[in-house]
Amino acid sequence: MLNPDLVGRTFTGVTSTLVSQEALDLFCAVIGEENTEIAPPTFSISITLDQSQTLLQDSGLDWSRVVHGDQRFEIKRPIIAGDQLVCSSTIESARAVAGNEIVTVRSDLHSGDELVVSTWSTLVVRA
Amino acid sequence: MNTFHADIVAGAELPTRTFQIDRALLVQYANASGDQNPIHQNEEFAISVGLPNVIAHGMLTMALVGKYVSDLAGGSAAVKEFSARFTKPVVVPANAVVDLVVSAKVLQNEAGLVKLELFAVVDDVKVLGMAKAVISTS
C-alpha cells in the first residue's frame, strides 16, 4: 500500500539526465519522425518513467502491479540534445476504487531553473 | 507546414492516417523508451498475467498519435499539450501487423491555439479515450 503521508510531497532527483542525440534518434526512429533536432511530444516519458520509479521507490507504491491509466504532457519547450534534465516527482493524489488504488504522479523536468515539461501519469495499482 | 489556418473551424474533421504496429516495433520502442516490461515482448509472460497476448505499450500508441499531431502542427515544436487515457490494450500477436487508425477533430481554433480531439482505433475499437492536444499556430 502507498504510504498516505507521502501524498503531496515532492521528491527531486540529485542527479540530472543528459539527453543524447542517440536517445532522440532512437525515439524518432520508432515513430518515423525525420526531424531529430527536437524531441517528439512524448519523449520525456523515457526519462520520467525510470526517474519517478526511483524517486518514489520508498513510497510503498508497488510498481509491479501498476497499469498505466492515462498520461498528460504540458510542454513548455521541446527537449533537445545536450539538455541536462532534473526530474522531480510528486504523488498528487491517491484514492481507492473497487479495491484498486488510483495514484496520480506528476513529474516535472527542469533544466537549471527552467521548467521544460510537466507530465501527469495516472497509475492503477491492481489489488 | 502547419495544417491550420484561421479558416479551420471547430468541428472540422482532419484526415485519417494509419500506423502499423508489429512485434519488432514493440522491441524498438522498448529499447528507445527504456520500458522493458515483458508484457510488451514475451507472449508466455503476458498470458501468465491474464492478458490475451503481448500488448503494445500504451505510450507507443500515444507516441504514434503524437507523430500524427506533430505532422498536423508542422513539427513537434508546436505541440504544447497532449493527453490520453488508455482505454483498451492494443493486442499484437506474433507475425501480425496491427493497424492503428488515427484521426482528429478540431475543438477550437482561437488566439493562435488549436485544440484537437484525437481518435485512435484498432479493429473498430477505440484504444485511447479523452485524447486531446493543443497546438500553437503562431
Image (spheres, coloured by chain):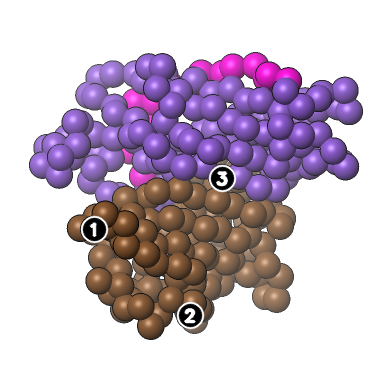
Chain colours: A brown, B purple
- Foreground residue, B57 or A83? B57
> Alpha-carbon distance for marks 2 and 3?
24 Å
Q: With B111 as the anchor, is B18 left or right in this view?
A: left
Number of dots carrying numbers: 3
Q: Secondary structure at mark 1?
A: loop
Compared to residue B95, the image places residue A46 above or below, namely below
Q: Are marks 2 and 3 on the same chain?
A: no
Q: Secondary structure at mark 3?
A: strand
Q: Quadrant of the N terminus of chain A?
A: bottom left
Q: With A22 as the anchor, is A56 left or right in this view?
A: left
Q: Residue at the spot x=15%, y=44% of the render?
A: B49
- Residue B27 in sight from this viewpoint: yes
The residue to which callout 1 is attached is A99
The kind of residue tagged 1 is Gly
**Front of the two marks 3 and 1:** 1
The kind of residue tagged 3 is Ser
The kind of residue tagged 2 is Arg
The residue to which callout 2 is attached is A9
The residue to which callout 3 is attached is B83
